[in-house]
Amino acid sequence: MRWDIAIVGAGASGYYAAIHAAQTLESYGMSYRIAILERAAEVLAKVRISGGGRCNVTHDQRDPKILIEHYPRGNKALLGPFHHHGPDQVIEFFNELGVVLKTESDGRMFPVTDRSDTIINALVAEADRLGIQVVTKSSVQALTYDPSQSFWHIETTAQPYQARTVLVAAGSSPQMGRLLEDLGHKMVPPVPSLFTFHIQDARLQGLMGLSTEVSLRLLDSQGTPSKPLVATSGPLLITHWGVSGPAVLKASAWGARLLSEWKYQCFIELNWLPGSTFDSIDRALEEFSLKEAKKSMNFNPFSTLPKRLWERMITTAGCGGEQTWAHLTKEQRIALATELTQGRYRVTGKSTFKEEFVTAGGVDLGEVRFKDLSSKRVPQLFFAGECLDVDAVTGGFNFQNAWTTGYLAAQGMVAWLMEHPVEARD
């Protein structure tokens, strides 16, 4: 069987690319054969589980210059693509499919139904309408370009195929990575991104479920600040295995390669009063001990700090709950200011964040033309989504990368087909 466009991977970027290619060709009154190959039995599996089953489609950040700040890897390469196809275009696309999106207070965008099935059903229905063939349980085993015929030969576990253009949208598949290396592409080794930290520390015991704003810095196993410095801020959630939340997830993303090198053995430094310094808190504690001398140390002078956490901090600093502020010693004050602004916690491992597994690594970006996501090394080969060395923090940004690169790859493949109008039919 011979196709004009073969897409490897039935995920977000693969479906988005297939639909946009077919819609564009349809608008020109042209008929082409487009197929999606998927090694699993289910399509759009990651879409189904994303956002806790609600599907965080994109983020309501319309300025490309600010949007790229959420991508630890690939930010510069995505600036131009986001100008061409950003959140506005994604929202319009889904609206045209009958899917209305809503924006939450933190900028994340979900279908108003709060169901990922809404996104899946819309994509599947449109692909069906356009006549896109979806072949599941068909793992690609070999990918060979024939320059004499300008065709791709695709060996799968089901049967062999041919295609005029190929889009790789297979995520972080190790097997596909090896096939691309065989074609001469440089692959940046994949490492996990977006994960939570394992911490066993008495200071956190019994505080599970507590969430508060923090500033966080990554330190190596010797307690030395990372180079380059990884510093984040945002909500932190204390869990039964350690810590999670946006501040931790951002640190895991920006520090993905460092953390891998450290084998996830390091320290984090937490400032539980972000915006404050050791010196400012030390002075504040001294002033409070003079003004509120008769009050118990259980009285928390910091409104943003949860009561349970404050009680744990004063205990750690050696202050009894019944001790009055008047009896706060200099040593206790320094210890308390240190815990509040420079507390160090040993990280002993990681856990995947919910069901959303994201990797850093993939096709080296220097080998890709980002105007159309085509390969600089092999003709008629395109890329989209997580198979590229691009990844983002949580908030809909990884899906936005999938949509944007899928769209541009689709336009690139359509342009090639129109420039080479040789009928590809069995």
Image (spheres, rainbow, N blue to C red):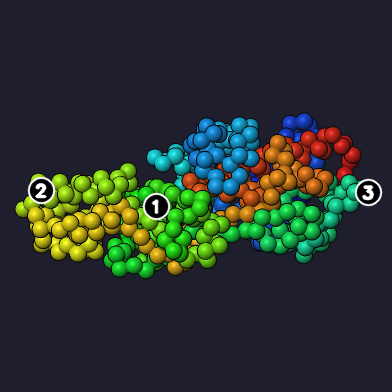
Locate residue 101 relative to residue 277 in the image: left or right.
right
Contact? badges 2 and 1 (CB < 8 Å): no
Mark pair 3, 2: CA separation: 87 Å
Residue 32, picture quadrant: top right
Residue type pointed to by label 2? Leu
Outermost residue to the front? 330
**How much space separates mark 1 and mark 3, taking CA atoms?**
56 Å
> Does residue 381 appear left or right of residue 392 in this picture?
right
Query: Is residue 40 visible in the rendered structure shown here?
Result: yes
Q: Are marks 1 and 3 in contact (CB under 8 Å)?
A: no
Q: Residue at x 64, y 48 (%)?
A: 385
Reply above or below: 226 against 379.
Answer: below
In the image, what residue occupies the spot 81% across and 45% down? 380
For label 1, the crowd category at 10 Å Cα-Cα, with few meaning under 14, some 14 to 19 and many 20 or more, is: many
- Amino acid type at image mark 1: Leu
Instruction: Estimate how packed mark 2 is, as few (under 14), some (14 to 19) or many (20 or more) residues with alpha carbons within 10 Å.
Output: few
In this picture, is 84 found above or below 137? above
Q: Mark 3 highlights which residue?
A: 148
Q: Nearer the viewer, mark 1 or mark 3?
A: 1
Residue 404 position, x and y percent, is 63, 40
Mark 3 or mark 2, which has the lower sequence index? 3
Q: Nearer the viewer, residue 418 or 259?
A: 259
Secondary structure found at label 1? strand
Secondary structure beneath dot 2 equals: helix
Checking the image for residue 424, the label placed there is none
Q: Is residue 137 left or right of residue 254?
A: right
The residue to which callout 2 is attached is 290
**Residue 37 or 78: which is nearer the viewer?**
78
Query: Along the polypeptide, which appears first: circle 1 or circle 3?
Result: 3
Q: Which residue is mark 1?
A: 216
